[in-house]
């Protein structure tokens, strides 16, 4: 662990991700796909190439030991990990780094840092793993009239403090990263089983603040569902809700902070509901002639009450690109897991439903096991590997000058077909309009609900040198317009941040926005917390 | 339907509930139990006995047709349906009836009524079925400096407006009562399956505003879980959230209004997630030597991932009183239902777990059916009948001068045994202290979660003439103190209203209270909505 250092300009750890050879091979594949001669692979920035503006803030002596103005830290905390962020990094554009990066060790430290920010009129940006893909952690302080930016990085608050085995819950500090969390739970036979794609480089606090979407395709889709209670440091005092399995006492305090993206307070700790580690698994895949047919089968599963752990529909291109299938059919991956009981009856009924709805179940794909082995082979295994590699791959796409975006939503089943068609067409049209017509747009379901799916779209297209951001913005805008036009949400689990504001503002009922502004004014009277996220400063 | 008229002084409909003969028989049973000679059955109030204060408000001409000052309506809207409410009715105490009862027919009517209340500085009390047991719908306007009270009864907004069969959802007006709702859904093969005890005399809007608890013992415990979107008329404008199966776009707007108990706005409509009508059922019961043993088995079921529809643990007294068992053992009722698949494997594994945890499964009780028949026989059937009769029975207890209270909570499993012991002891001690030591205190689980149960307590004790309310208050206070002392919630699904305020105020994090006050000030600047509920006016 000690030797690994996070990349300051992109996803993950230095020295990890695709090698130069692998990148060269990717570039060749993409060039063929895009029908261009070749794609050059640009060099990522190095720290000594950067010319960061001087820090405008000096922490008070009492806080100095928590704070740094180190170049690596300031550069590394300048952006999240969106396409736009990595492109700007490749452009060596680090014009608005935080002035100070603070690493509190206690809740009192957090309070003291917020007090200082209020005194100094500095923006305070809560920071977990920095994996935001929506501009959630960057801040141009001067633009909003602040004296500077203090990024509050919670990495020092990384412990599982207490475990309640009986209730299967644990009190966990918010700064813990995914792998370190699971490592601390494993000896107790417990797991949170929250595996967003960002798992390796994101934290519990970040998941909570952004309503992260996780491992389970049904039932427990968002981190919200695992929250028993929260501790949140606000400028107006500490909020600590009670550990409750359920409650009907007024509007939920936790639900006000879940999704608040750092504008109301800094989440420092949570009691989280855990799972026993699964012992039984069962999975299979089925092929469909059309994506719409696959969606009907996924709907039947979502409405069956069987609650599959995985119910992932990949369109033909996505299945091919990820190596899950040959691209001649759309693929539905279905899986169940349990710590309690063998899953044969669950899978049997699921496959019956899939067959009834036109799916061609691949009998070779059926895996039923009592010890977890086997379930990750075949299509499911191929897909999973591609899923984990994706953020590294994305950095490589940037280096190759491509345009790349992933965006996701949720909508009701009755609206899905029209939404899907419009989003794909609008996005393709936008690609054509920016001269990237050879790009691909793929779709999969990440989560499914009885009343609708959460579709996830991926765009990969050739970029024009110096115009990557402009091209990307046109595509992002066309896609987001289509989502909002169809009444879908601008985000199912990527959050709002600064980038989704124009569409979030259309989606959110205006009187609710006023209530949220009022709540913020009560909790953050000096308006220091994450200005520009969710509401205007 | 036309001939049935709601009782103005207690639960349900005139002429329904226990007959005089049945009440006499009940009185005899109770007298034996309490070891007293006899219990006199008092006569309920009649309308002509009441001397309501004159109405202090006159609606503007444009609203006159929506408004009434009829005695029956004013008396009937004076209280909810708590023990305290019915005792006051028997005491002919209707000192603070609403000045006007308004029955809007459209959302515009609601807006106009709220505007009038703001102009007239009248308190506006949103009213569904009036089944509150926590003082949620009564208001002493003068006490808070208001010119009077307008109760806004939504009964005219009772339609299922639109059905989306594909997504299994419906757009429903908030004033619809339980039976009328199910009647409108039945032709479509759909059901909300939300069956609080108040089902017959409560409305969708009331369920939403109070986070009602329903039919399902696991998974979908609160009405919250079925909400796709809301329409809420606030004095600051209409809030309409999007129909979304899931979202991660900022804090949930719906979750701010769920549980807001009429202080932020009037819920007029909701898109609700529905269920297919169940075709398969499976159920059984098991007996336990101790309640704690039964709780361990219930915990195993709650943590199994089997998601039983019913997982109701009755203590021995509750099992006896409801005719479910003979009182020599504690009883666990387990049931599954599905519209999709036979449930044999589910029940088999559940009963294996119950047996492994010390339960004596009654093999005669096992029912597995494909058409819904049979599952309601035996212990489960007896319990269900008693459950539905309970509110009528409660009115009879008041007539017999008894002290009666039901209260409920939720807590984590690790804290349950100590909580249970303390609550029962504290409540019994309080009964003794008020001279009602022969009373009984029973407990059951209404809902169970992986991390804890929702226990429900019932108190029945002999009262002293003229002292019923004082005795009740002492018991209620001792019980509530015990709940809050153990970190449990003051309510899992009965809501806060005015009666639970002292304990809710302790439970709620104070900075959150400030945020809620600020949100209310933004949405209800004239502070007309339901003063005294959740926060001070």
Image (cartoon, coloured by chain):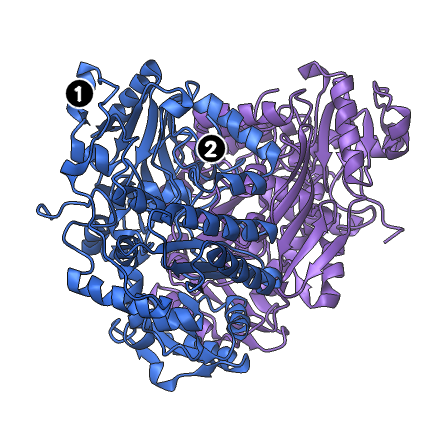
Chain colours: A blue, B purple
Given residues B164 and B160, the one toward you in this image is: B164
Indicate the position of residue B344 as horizontal and vertical percent values: 48, 77
Residue at the (85%, 45%) spot, across then down: B5
- Using the image, tell me which numbered label, if any, was put on residue A433: none
Total residue callouts: 2
Residue A445: name its quadrant.
bottom left
Indicate the position of residue A435 as horizontal and vertical percent values: 44, 57
Q: Is residue A10 above or below residue B354?
A: above
Residue at the far bottom: name it. A363
Label 2 sits on residue:
B429
Given residues B492 and A179, the one toward you in this image is: A179
Q: For the C terminus of chain B, give its image quadrant.
A: top right
Q: Secondary structure at mark 1?
A: helix
Q: Is residue A213 above or below residue B426?
A: below
Q: Is residue B241 left or right of residue A399?
A: right
Indicate the position of residue A238 as horizontal and vertical percent values: 36, 26
Q: For the N terminus of chain B, give its image quadrant.
A: bottom right
């Amino acid at each position: 662990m000690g030797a690994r250092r996070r990349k300051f300009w992109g996803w993950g750890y230095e020295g990890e991700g695709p090698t130069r050879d692998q990148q060269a091979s990717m570039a060749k594949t993409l060039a063929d796909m895009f029908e261009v001669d070749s794609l050059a692979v640009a060099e990522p920035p190095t720290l000594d190439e950067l010319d960061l503006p001087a820090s405008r803030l000096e922490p008070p002596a009492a806080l100095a030991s928590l704070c740094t103005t180190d170049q690596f830290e300031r550069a590394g905390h300048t952006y999240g990990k969106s396409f736009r962020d990595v492109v700007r990094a490749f452009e060596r554009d680090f014009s608005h780094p935080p002035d100070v990066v603070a690493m509190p060790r206690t809740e009192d430290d957090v309070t003291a840092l917020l007090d200082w920010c209020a005194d100094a009129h500095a923006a305070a940006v809560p920071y977990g793993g920095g994996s935001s893909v929506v501009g959630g952690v960057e801040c141009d302080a001067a633009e909003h009239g602040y004296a500077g930016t203090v990024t509050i990085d919670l990495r020092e608050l990384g412990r599982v403090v207490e475990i309640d085995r009986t209730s299967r819950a644990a009190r966990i500090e918010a700064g813990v990263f995914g792998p370190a969390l699971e490592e601390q739970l494993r000896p107790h036979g417990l797991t949170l089983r929250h595996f967003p794609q960002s798992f390796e480089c994101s934290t519990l606090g970040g998941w909570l603040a952004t309503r992260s979407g996780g491992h389970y395709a049904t039932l427990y889709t968002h981190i919200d569902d695992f929250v028993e209670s929260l501790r949140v440091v606000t400028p107006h005092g500490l909020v600590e809700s009670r550990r409750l399995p359920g409650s009907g006492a007024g509007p939920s305090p936790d639900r006000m902070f879940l999704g608040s993206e750092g504008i109301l307070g800094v989440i420092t700790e949570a009691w989280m509901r855990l799972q026993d580690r699964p012992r039984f698994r069962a999975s299979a895949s089925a092929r469909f002639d059309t994506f719409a047919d696959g969606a009907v089968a996924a709907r039947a599963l979502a409405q069956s009450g069987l609650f599959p752990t995985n119910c992932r529909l990949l369109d033909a291109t996505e299945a091919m690109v990820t190596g899950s299938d040959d691209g001649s059919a759309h693929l539905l991956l279905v899986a169940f897991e349990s710590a309690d009981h063998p899953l044969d009856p669950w899978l049997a009924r699921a496959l019956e439903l899939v067959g009834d709805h036109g799916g061609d179940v691949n009998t070779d794909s059926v895996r039923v096991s009592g010890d977890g082995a086997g379930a990750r082979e075949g299509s499911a295994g191929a897909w999973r590997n591609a899923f984990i590699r994706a953020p590294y791959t994305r950095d490589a796409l940037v280096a190759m000058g491509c345009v790349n975006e992933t965006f996701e939503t949720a909508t009701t089943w009755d609206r899905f077909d029209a939404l899907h068609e419009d989003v794909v067409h609008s996005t393709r049209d936008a690609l054509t309009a920016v001269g990237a017509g050879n790009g691909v747009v793929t779709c999969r379901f990440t989560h499914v609900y009885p009343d609708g799916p959460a579709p996830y779209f991926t765009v990969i297209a050739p970029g024009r040198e110096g115009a990557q951001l402009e091209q990307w913005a046109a595509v992002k805008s066309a896609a987001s317009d289509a989502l909002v036009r169809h009444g879908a949400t601008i985000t199912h689990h990527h959050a709002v941040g600064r980038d989704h504001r124009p569409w979030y503002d259309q989606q959110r009922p205006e009187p609710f926005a006023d209530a949220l502004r009022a709540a913020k004014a009560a909790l953050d009277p000096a308006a220091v917390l994450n200005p520009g996220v969710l509401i205007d400063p």
